[in-house]
Amino acid sequence: MARTEVHSTLSATSIKLARVSQNVGERRLRRVSAWLLLLFLLQGELGAVWDREWHAFVGRDQFWTPPHTLIYSCVAGAGLLALAVVLIETFRYRRRVPGVDDTSTVPIFRFFHAPLGFSVLGFGALLALIAAPLDNYWHELYGIDIALWAPFHMMGVTGGLIGMLGMVYVFASEAAIERQSGGAPRRFLGLTALELGIIMTMGSIMNYVLTGFLQFPVVTVGTIHISTYPLPLIAGCVMFMLAGLRTTQRVGIATLLTFVLFLHTLVVELFVPWAIRVAVAQQDIPYRVANLVPEFRLDYAFLPVAFLLSAVIIDGIAYLRVRKTGSPNSSMLQTIIQGIIVTLPIVFFTPLILRDYTPYAPIFLPEKGVPFEPVQMAVIVIISLFIAMAFGALGAWLGEDFGDIWRWSKR
């Protein structure tokens, strides 16, 4: 009888160890895939800005331009990796492997089961791939355009944005699982490796927002033209600064995220002009405007400085909240007020930094040679500021909601 009890105990221990081993394998599969996806994301980020500048400086004589090759190899690689994870996880779900169940996956078409982040990313990659041949057909019909607002440009941009949001879910779910496992992982700047992955992905999304920052519509009221490019900058930056804070619960995240964004813009600005010059020389093709050659621009590289004061304000408020309540979180109303407040520095500093980069940097552009009424200008400025603050409030609301989801979701 004693021998039977010992045998039962050993069997139970063996089963437990096997489950732990399988769970470790599950974690390794998802986390290695997450870091590979981040590499694809950085590749696509370079390709997106390169494509924007390629259209502006060179044009578009064929579909397989160098930046398109970089972009779509990234989209295909990320999409295939997401598909592989979905199929593997579906197989493991059917076999009831520990760590793969309804608490860590979502159903897709009632048959597949996979982590939410990989599912979202896969649909985003699919949308971007579908947009590629349609965009090519559009160019064949209507020729070269450098505007962001061509329909299949927007389809591809939307797919890319969905895919990147899926990547945040991938890192965030693994960070939540790691946090709730009770372990003590190594930290750098107070963050675990997975939390750093979240911040790096958010930095890429913010840089993605910057990609089309001067291609947003110009609204005309009377004799005054109004640039709308600050609106996506405001909404995007406020959203991810606050989402990063809510996700990691670490004071200083907004400032760190601004620094990460600066590293992105610096690398992009070092790479893209050089890549265009090299590709043009190798293919022996002319520039659209003779002698207009791309070069490194310090103002674009330092554009994230426009968001620094806003980041410091967010982190300062979070620090005071921690001192008072022990938590950096504010109520929804307080968060929205923060979003409104931090809008103003972005509106003020962005045109100053970009003033030599483009003639569209000033937000308010009176028609040249046509007088305007000062009262009319004052009304337009006030209304525009209210609209900008509304975008800041929207970004703050989204940041709080998404941040809380990313903090706790294990799927």
Image: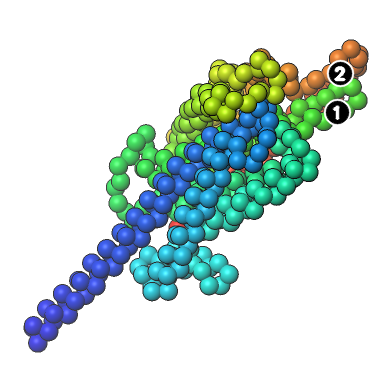
Mark 2 vs mark 1, CA separation in Å: 10 Å
Examine the rendering and report whether any part of residue 279 can be seen.
Answer: yes
Residue 383 position within the rendered picture, expressed as x and y whole percent measured from the top left: 81, 30
- Determine the residue located farthest toward the bottom in the rendered image: 1
Q: How far from the left and from the top, in percent, is residue 62?
A: 66, 39
Look at the picture and state if 58 lies above or below 86.
Answer: above
Quadrant location, the N terminus:
bottom left
Q: Which mark is residue 378?
A: none
Q: Residues within 10 Å of mark 1 (few under 14, many from 20)?
A: some
Q: How far across and down, in percent of the image, does residue 364 sit? A: 78, 21
The three-letter amino acid code for the residue at tag 2 is Glu
Q: Secondary structure at mark 1?
A: strand
- Answer yes or no: is residue 309 visible: no
Left/right placement of residue 32 relative to residue 368 reads: left
Label 2 neighbour load within 10 Å: few <14, some 14-19, many 20+: few
Q: Is residue 332 above or below residue 218?
A: below
Residue 228 image offset from top left, x and y in percent: 74, 31
Q: Which residue is pictured at 86% across the width and 14% down the height?
A: 368
User: Residue at the spot x=37%, y=42% of the render?
Assistant: 193
Amino acid bearing label 1: Thr
Name the residue tied to disc 2.
367
Q: In the figure, residue 221 lies in which quadrant?
A: top right
* Residue tagged 1: 220
Could you say which is closer to the camera, residue 5 or residue 286?
286
Tell me which residue sits at (56%, 45%) in the image. Answer: 72
Does dot 2 land on a helix, a strand or a loop? loop
